[in-house]
Image: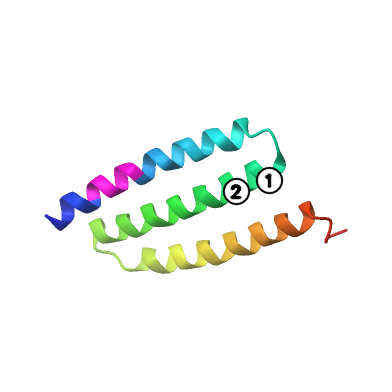
Amino acid sequence: MADTVLLVASGIALAALVLAGLRMVLGPTAVDRTVALDGMTIMALSLIAAYAYFTGRGIYIDVAMVYGLASFAGVVAIARYLEGGLK
């Protein structure tokens, strides 16, 4: 039962990742693209965690944590640049 729920949730996360990618490509402003990038990162993190569960390899959780920290730093840097804080 739990595997089925996680598999359905992974499918939904994959669909959300594709839709966020579409928003990143079509977004009219840089802010739209930044938010889409952040959303894509969150969906990728959830897919990495689901993959770790399905394969039984906990090392992928560490990979997801490092990826999340790097993504957070990147989004903060982009946001600071967009509001004129970085020059």
Question: Left of 31 or right of it: where is 49?
Answer: left
Picture residue at 72% right of the left edge, 60% below the top: 77
Q: Amino acid at mark 2?
A: Val
**Image quadrant where one finds the C terminus:** bottom right
**Image quadrant where one finds the N terminus:** bottom left
Image coordinates of residue 22 in percent, x first then y, are: 53, 33
Q: 10 Å neighbourhood of mark 1: few (<14), some, or many (≥20)?
A: some
Picture residue at 64% right of the left edge, 64% below the top: 73
- Secondary structure of residue under mark 1: helix
Report the disc number at residue 31. 1
* Residue where numbered disc 2 is placed: 35
Q: Among all residues in the image, which is located at the extreme top?
A: 26
Image coordinates of residue 58 in percent, x first then y, are: 32, 68
- Secondary structure of residue under mark 2: helix
Looking at the rendering, the stretch of residues picked out in magenta corresponds to: 7-12
Q: Amino acid at mark 1?
A: Val
Picture residue at 65% right of the left edge, 59% below the top: 74
Quarter of the image where one finds residue 3? bottom left
Q: Are marks 2 and 1 in contact (CB under 8 Å)?
A: yes
Q: Please, is residue 2 above or below residue 31 in the view?
A: below
Image coordinates of residue 21 in percent, x first then y, are: 52, 37
